[in-house]
Structure formats: structure tokens, C-alpha cells
Amino acid sequence: MPDIRDDLTGALSDPDPVRRAQIQMLKPLPKRFYTTVSIGPAEDGRHAVLLDGRTVRTPAKHPLTAPTARAAELLAAEWDAQKDVINPATMPVTRLANTAIDGVAKDIRGVFDDILNFAGTDLLCYRASEPEGLVARQTERWDPVISWAAEKLDARFILAEGVVHQTQPGAAIDAYAKALRAYATPLCLACLHTITTLTGSALLAIAFAEKHLSAEEAWALAHLDEDWQIEHWGTDEEAFQRRENRWQDMQAATATLDALR
């Protein structure tokens, strides 16, 4: 009998959320084909997700496993939450684990360097020149993170006004890289890369990892400019929904990183 899990490969792994949605719309969602979800031992002390006692496989046919029981429980909870059909849109932790196992594990250095590239053009380092209220709000809320990075990580970043590129000191990037090395495992880097890309800030990602900020605090700081615009001009339903969808991915990444501690 064909393994219906193979039908989920594209929808669970494509990194582009638009493409994932297109894939899901092109074919009907597969029906739930299992009764029980459990966690079992895997190689190297890892924890595998089991459906009716059978190991779930990633799109590249690797066992779907996690390095800690808590992280495996997050995966199992997603599979158990599926009811009549399996909807990949509601399984962000599974997508994250697939990415880590099938992708990041083969290119840890590349993902590590990509996060460093974000640090070189970090959202928190680029400030508005006006209006006065926005300038003040950025100073009040972003400066403490810049100061924390300087004091705790020895990473001293330079601020810039507007969008003109500001090359950051090599010493600051090196100091950031030193802190990031503590998280140089496939799933940790997948989490941090997701947080970084969703917020536009490698500093917010490492501040969450180091428990300086909560997920909610990092998210609010990442959307400081957007929230300013909403306060003055309002928003629309489509923009609101896009942000809510990104927040679901942010919650998955931060919860998974917490579960790896």
C-alpha cells in the first residue's frame, strides 16, 4: 500500500509560504491515516515521532526526530492535532524540523553565515530621521537591545540614519558570531534563522535565544515602525492576516528553541 505520507512532502517542506499555500490548494488535503501518535527512541539519543508505531519521515526520507523530548513533544502534538485531514499549514514546527534535518544539517555554515549577514544590516541599526515621535520611540525601545549586545556580547554596532548602508565593525560581527556558535546545531540554527528573517533582526533573534527578550517582546520591537504607521493610518484585513500568519511561524520557532534548552 502506498505511504500517504509521501503526499505531504511538498506542502510540508517548501520554504516559500506562498508556494506552500499554492501546493495545498492544488491537491486535496490527505485524510488522517493514523490512530495514535507517540514518541520513541531514535539513534544518538534523539526522539522520534511515531504514527501507529511507525517513524514519520521527512521529505528527504530521514526520520523525523528531535534532540530533546520536549521538542519531540511539540512535533507529536502537531500530528495529533490533525483531525479528519492533515493540514500542513497548521504544522509549523514540523516544517521547521524538516528544514533542519533535510537542509540545514547539510549546510550549517551557510545558514550560520546567512544569519551573520543579517547582523551586518540589522533592522535595529537603521533609524528614521522623522517624524520626531517615531525617532523617539526607536531610541527608547531599540537602544536597550543595542546596549545589551555591547555589554553582554561585546558586539558594538553602529547606528545609521535612513537606508544608506552602514558597514558594521568587523569586531562587532565577530562578537556576534561567537555568541551564535553556541547554537550551531541544525534545529537551533533553523529556529534562529526563522526568527531572524521574520523580524529582520539577528540582534532580536540572539536576544531571545539568550533570554534577554521574550518572543512577544522581540515581535513587538520588530514591528515598531509598522505599529507606528497603524496607529496613525490604520491597517487592512489582508495585512493583518499576513502578520498573524508570520506570528504563528514566530511562535513555532521560539517555542522550539525553548524546547531545545
Image (spheres, grey):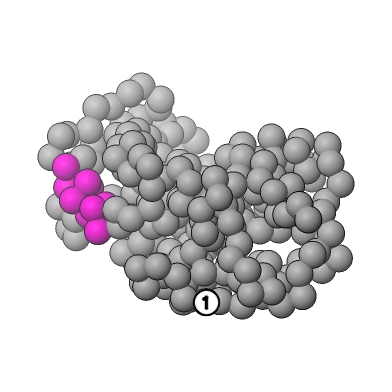
- Left or right: 256, with 74 as reference point: left
State yes or no: residue 177 in magenta: yes
Q: x and y percent of residue 112 in the render?
A: 31, 43
Q: Which of the two residues, 165 or 255, is positioned nearer the viewer here?
A: 255
Whether residue 76 is situated above or below residue 126 in the rendered picture: below
Total number of numbered labels?
Answer: 1
Q: Residue furthest top?
A: 164
Residue 142 in view here: no
Residue 8 position, x and y percent, is 71, 49
Q: Residues within 10 Å of mark 1 (few under 14, many from 20)?
A: some
Q: Residue at x 42, y 56 (%)?
A: 187
Q: Is residue 58 above or below residue 225?
A: below
Res 245 visible: yes
- Residue 78 x %, y %: 66, 67
- Amino acid at dot 1: Gly
Viewport quadrant of the N terminus: bottom right
In this view of the protein, which residue sits in the foreground, 90 or 138?
90
Q: Which residue is mark 1?
A: 40
Quarter of the image holding residue 228?
Answer: top right
Q: Quadrant of residue 122?
A: top left
Q: Residue at x 69, y 35 (%)?
A: 19
For this view, does 1 lie left or right of residue 177? Answer: right
Q: Secondary structure at mark 1?
A: strand
Where residue 205 appears, as percent x and y from the top left, is 39, 53
Front residue of this view, candidates 161 and 181:
181
Q: Which residues are magenta?
A: 174-182
Residue at the image position 34 percent from the left and 49 percent from the top: 203
User: At 33% across and 36% down in the image, what residue appears?
Assistant: 110
Q: Quadrant of the C terminus?
A: bottom left
> Magenta segment, principal secondary structure?
helix
